[in-house]
Image (spheres, rainbow, N blue to C red):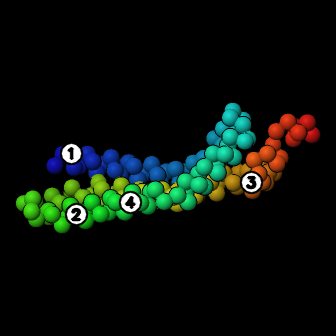
Amino acid sequence: MATGVVAALLSVLVLAFVEGLRLFYPAHETWLRLRRIRGRRLVRVTRRRYEAAAEGTVPRRLATLLLGLIIVWVAIASLLDKRWNEVVLDVLPSVIVWLALLRTPGALRVIARRMKEFERLQGEDPDAGPGEDDGPAAVRL
């Protein structure tokens, strides 16, 4: 029972982490620091990776697999001689992680959109190719 409670708390932390990223990452100051330290090109590549990951199907597939496991666990709970409250405590962490998996692509989309907006605020074209306005030629101007 104690391990179920600990697992539920950890799964809530996972969901809070995903939601925290969605709401706050990257802050404008953090984005400027990343851009200053790592370079404009690397920050743009990172944004494109976030966009690609948001369009990926891996989180949805994992969420579907986890949902299947949850359904199987609830279905065989009567065979394991468990009460309904024990089954709920066993399934609760998995349901919360399932929600976090479903929220991950949306969070990545919001992060990429925020980074794109920061690029626009700097006067750049976020939809330009990687070498169109970057590099030594742009620095010489």
To which quarter of the image does residue 39 belong?
top right
List x then y, in percent, for residue 111.
59, 53
Q: Nearer the viewer, mark 2 or mark 3?
A: 2
Query: Which amino acid type is marked by label 4?
Result: Ala
Residue 23 makes an appearance in the image:
no
Give the SS element for disc 1.
helix
Identity of the residue drawn at 88% across and 39% down: 137
Q: Nearer the viewer, mark 2 or mark 1?
A: 2
Quarter of the C terminus within the rendering: top right
What is the number of the mark on residue 126? 3
Identity of the residue drawn at 44% across and 57% down: 59
Residue 4 makes an appearance in the image:
yes
Query: Label 3: few (<14), some or many (≥20) within 10 Å?
Result: some
Q: Earlier in the sequence, mark 2 or mark 3?
A: 2
Image-based side of 123 in relation to 84, left or right: right
What is the number of the mark on residue 3? 1
Q: Which residue is mark 2?
A: 72
